[in-house]
Image (cartoon, grey):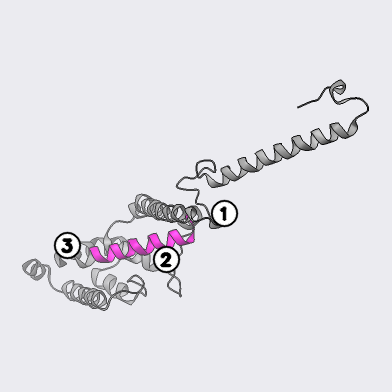
Amino acid sequence: MQYPVEQLGSGSPSAFKVGTQSELRNSTAANNARVFFTVQSPFKIGLHRDNVLSAGLLPDYPGNVSLLENVTVMTLNSALEDLRSTTLQAISGSLRRLEYFAGLRDQAGTYTHWGLARIHGDLAANKALAQEHRHVVSRILSTPLHRLLVDVEQSSRMAGTTPALYLEQLMQKPDLLPPQPSAGSTHHFNSMLRALSRLVKLPPDAIRLIS
C-alpha cells in the first residue's frame, strides 16, 4: 500500500517508517503462513508416483507419519509395476528370469538395478526386486516337472547350449534364491533342480512316460 504524502505529513518521516514496518510485518506473517501451508500440503508440492518425498521435506509432525508410509507403499507398487511391465516382459521363461535376478545381486546379496533405483530410489527398487524374485521362485516350485522341462528346453535353446549343460551351469550360479529363504524352500528348490538334471539325460520317450 502507498500512503499519500499529505496523509502522513511532510514533516513526519517517523509516521511513514512506522506504517511501512507494520506493512512489512503483516506481509511477512502472511507469507510465512502461506509457506507453512505449502509445505504441509502434498498437493501443493506435486506429490505423485515418481516424486517421492524424503522425510527432510516435511516438518516433524505426527500427521506426516501416515503420509510417508503411504508414499512408501505407493512407491513400492509403482516399482513393481515398472519392473513387470518393462524389464520382465523381455525375459521369457521362469528359469531365465531366475537367472536374471541372481545376476542382479552383488557379493553382499543386494540387488543392483540402476534404472529402477534412479526412478524409484534404492530402497523401493530393492524391495520390488526381492519381492518379484520370491514370486518367481514360488512359481517355479509350484510348476509340475513336465512343464519345467519345457522351460529348460526353451531356455537352453536361447542360451545356445544343451538342456543338461544349461542345468549344470544354472546349479552352479550363486544367489538363485532370494535373501533369507526358508529351509523348506531351499531343500525343495535343490531337489527340483536335481530331478530336472536327471530327467533331461533320459531318452525323450522315457520322459514322456514319466510326465
Res. 159 visible in picture:
no
In reply to whether residue 101 is colored magenta, the answer given is no
Q: Spatial distance from mark 2 to mark 3, Cα to Cα?
A: 26 Å
Which residue is found at the position 23% from the left and 78% from the top? 187
Name the disc covering residue 59, or none: 1
Residue 120, above or below 174: above
Residue 142, above or below 180: above
Q: Is residue 134 left or right of residue 150?
A: right
Q: Which residue in the protein does label 2 denote? A: 104
Which amino acid type is marked by label 3?
Arg
**Residue 92 or residue 72, whichever sits in front:** 72
Which amino acid type is marked by label 1?
Pro
Q: Which residues are magenta?
A: 120-139
In reply to whether residue 123 is colored magenta, the answer given is yes
**Residue 73 or residue 162, whichever sits in front:** 73
Query: Which of marks 1 and 3 precedes in the sequence?
Result: 1
Hey, which quadrant is residue 193 in on the image? bottom left
